Image: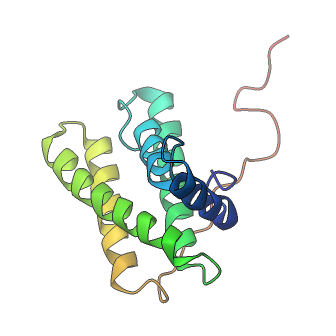
Amino acid sequence: VEAICHPERAARLVEYHARRPEVPGWGEVLDRLLDATWRGVPRKGLAAEVQRTVNFVVLNTLMRLTADGQTPERVKSLVWLKLDDLHDWLEQRGASIGNEEWKAHYSYAAATIEMFKSDPAAFQFNPLPELPQGAPIGGWSK
């Protein structure tokens, strides 16, 4: 996600799309990223836990990109818009979904976006999760 959302790469997408409109722009890349994560079909079980973790990695990456003083305004402005759109989608989706875990996920994400947008400079980012050392629970069978 960080490679896709690198500030210089995003700025090149904006510029390249301006020169060649048939090439996907930064906004389209963001839409596809959000469609593949947040707006994807909610999974169940362990796949749901992985999906929710990935969703927050995407959200944190987008907010960090916006808060980064090195990110060009033309990149930030599209991320800001997509965060607005995502916030609205999260509120609607959270109100309509019956699953408690997903409802909590959407509600917390919407509140996180609100807190971030109220003062991006003061927002405290949670560290991104790291893979634990060692084999998965239960170990590997041979």
Compared with 121, 34 (above or below) is above
Q: Where on the picture, by quarter, is residue 98?
A: top left
Residue 16: image location, x then y, percent:
60, 54
- Residue under the image location 21 percent in, 48 percent down: 94
Quick check: 47 above or below 77? above
How many numbered discs sit on the rendered protein? 0
Q: Position of residue 55 (x, y in %)?
A: 47, 48
Kindly give the residue lying farthest to the front in the view shown.
19
Give the residue furthest to the left. 96
Q: Return the residue found at the far top.
A: 142
Residue reaching furthest to the right: 142
Q: Position of residue 119 (x, y in %)?
A: 39, 87
Q: Is residue 125 above or below residue 38?
A: below
The residue at the point 26 percent across, 52 percent down is 90
* Left or right: where 114 falls relative to 35: left
Left or right: residue 75 versus residue 10 is left
Query: In the image shown, does 16 or 38 lie closer to the viewer?
Result: 16
18 vs 82, nearest the viewer: 18
Residue 59 percent coordinates (x, y) = 47, 58
Residue 142, placed above or below residue 72: above
Viewer-proximal residue, 60 or 52?
A: 60
Q: Quadrant of the C terminus?
A: top right
Identify which residue is drawn at 24% across, 37% down: 99
The colour scheme used to paint the residues is rainbow
